[in-house]
Image (tube, rainbow, N blue to C red):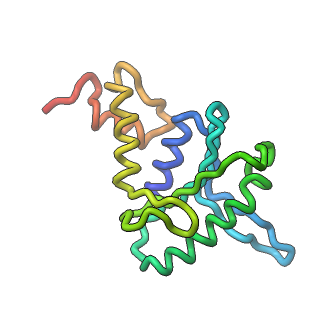
Amino acid sequence: MNHLEKLVRQYYQWRGYIVRGNVRVGAREQGGWSGELDIVAYHPYSDHLIHLEPSIDTQPWEEREIRFRRKFEAGRRYIHREIFPWLEPSTPLEQVAILVSAGRRELGGGKVMSIDEFMAMVREAVVRRGPLCQSAIPEEYDLLRTLQLGLCGYRRVVD
């Protein structure tokens, strides 16, 4: 798991989602799997189901299109059936590729978000939390807690 994938997982867990990561889906009779999904998260109170595929690759868009289409199709086929089988099949599924560049807004049947856009969302949530001494992000979310310390300081930000 790379640092971006870990940060995405921690962010959704911290926000109250049930998160599964690097899940192999679609067991084949002859062995192996149909695919692996990086992050699937479900928020039980808002009923939000999201499949995220973070990547720092720099492949051409044509190659990304093939790869992400395969991953997102596997997500649509298996998330309700194998990862969260207790969810209603009609629960809407949002699919997002988090990429270095968001030169496109859609890829392989899912949305595209740049890493910078994702980080802005994380930064906003962490800054709202405030200084570490007042409302520390739990230790288990080490990347988020480090961001809190850097963005908000222990007691305050020193210029």
Work out which residue is located at the far right of the displayed protein and give it.
Answer: 29
Q: Is residue 79 left or right of residue 149?
A: right
Work out which residue is located at the far left of the displayed protein and give it.
Answer: 159
User: Is 47 placed above or below 115 here?
Assistant: above
Residue 81 pos. (x, y %): 79, 55
Q: In percent of the image, x 48 and y 38: which residue is there?
A: 141
Nearest the viewer among 75 and 158 is 75
Residue 103 pos. (x, y %): 37, 67
Q: In percent of the image, x 51 and y 36: which residue is there?
A: 140
Q: In percent of the image, x 86 and y 74: which residue is there?
A: 29
Residue 145 pos. (x, y %): 40, 36
Question: Total label count?
Answer: 0
Nearest the viewer among 30 and 124 is 124
Q: Is residue 128 left or right of residue 35?
A: left
Q: In percent of the image, x 60 and y 49: which residue is there?
A: 50
Residue 33 pos. (x, y %): 74, 70
